[in-house]
Amino acid sequence: MNSLVVLFFASNVLAALLLGVKFVRQSDPVFKYFGIGLLFDALAFAMWTIGYTNPNLLLSFVTYGAIAFLISLIVFLYVSLSKASASTRLWVTVLGAAMIAGIFFVGRYSVNLAYISPEGFLFFNLTPLVQMLYVFALAFTFVPLIQLVASKFEAPHSTLVRYGFIGQMVGGIMLITSTDAQVLYITGWIIGTIYLVLWVDLLFNRKAWLTR
């Protein structure tokens, strides 16, 4: 077991949890749903942490974490459509949920299994097809939402939110696709640093929440 990997997963649970709670407490529905999505992400990392620290339960908790993560994408898709008509929002969300469910089943029944490397890294070991599906789903749901959420903040907080969460998304893609130890270490430090900056601004700076 790699203590830095444990620290990385635990810090992601805490970061997503605290930011999620902060967004959920806001009156704006976009913020509320964005916070709910972040809370599902916190749950996903919690499941992966449990699986990592209990290798006998690894495959089950990787699956539970994947379910929580994919649910967060459905929530993100729903809130990103807040400016669409009610019927459009409903049908696009239903279609998106069906596609995300398809991604889960394709990934669930692919031949590759998650494992912990000798260096102590957790690899989801997704096939190239499943990696592609996850990346497309993450980009299509999260990118429009980042722009929407950031647009509600005043500068310079809007810039921090926009590029901070873009950085987190890119980091997530690297965790899905990369198997290089050095790249994963660097990605982990980048993700942790971005979360720290977001914490300082959004959790401890009341002026950041003076929205447009």
Image (cartoon, grey):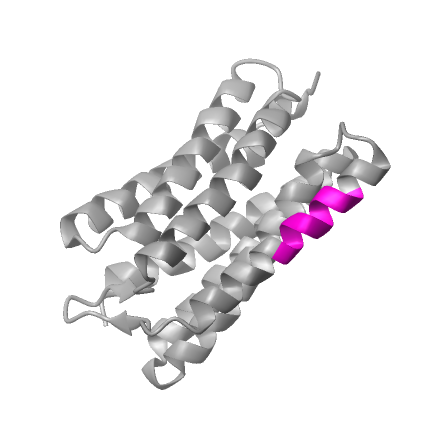
Question: Height in image: 24 above or below 51?
Answer: above
Seen at 36% across and 56% down, the residue is 129
Q: Give residue 189's quadrant in the image.
A: top left
- Judged by its main secondary structure, the magenta piece is helix
Question: Height in image: 41 above or below 63?
Answer: above
Decide whether residue 18 is among the magenta residues.
Answer: no
Residue 65, percent from left and from top: 49, 66
Look at the image and tell me in which quarter the N terminus lies. Answer: bottom left
Seen at 66% across and 35% down, the residue is 80
Residue 15, percent from left and from top: 48, 48
Judged left or right of residue 163, residue 211 is: right
Residue 118, percent from left and from top: 15, 71
Decide whether residue 94 is among the magenta residues.
Answer: yes
Residue 59, percent from left and from top: 40, 78
Judged left or right of residue 25, residue 119 is: left
Count of residue discs: 0
- The part of the chain drawn in magenta is 90-98
Q: Is residue 65 visible?
A: no
Q: Nearer the viewer, residue 48 or 170?
A: 170
Judged left or right of residue 80, residue 198 is: left
Seen at 84% across and 37% down, the residue is 86
Look at the image and tell me in which quarter the C terminus lies. Answer: top right
Q: Nearer the viewer, residue 52 or 14?
A: 52
Q: Give residue 125's quadrant in the image.
A: bottom left
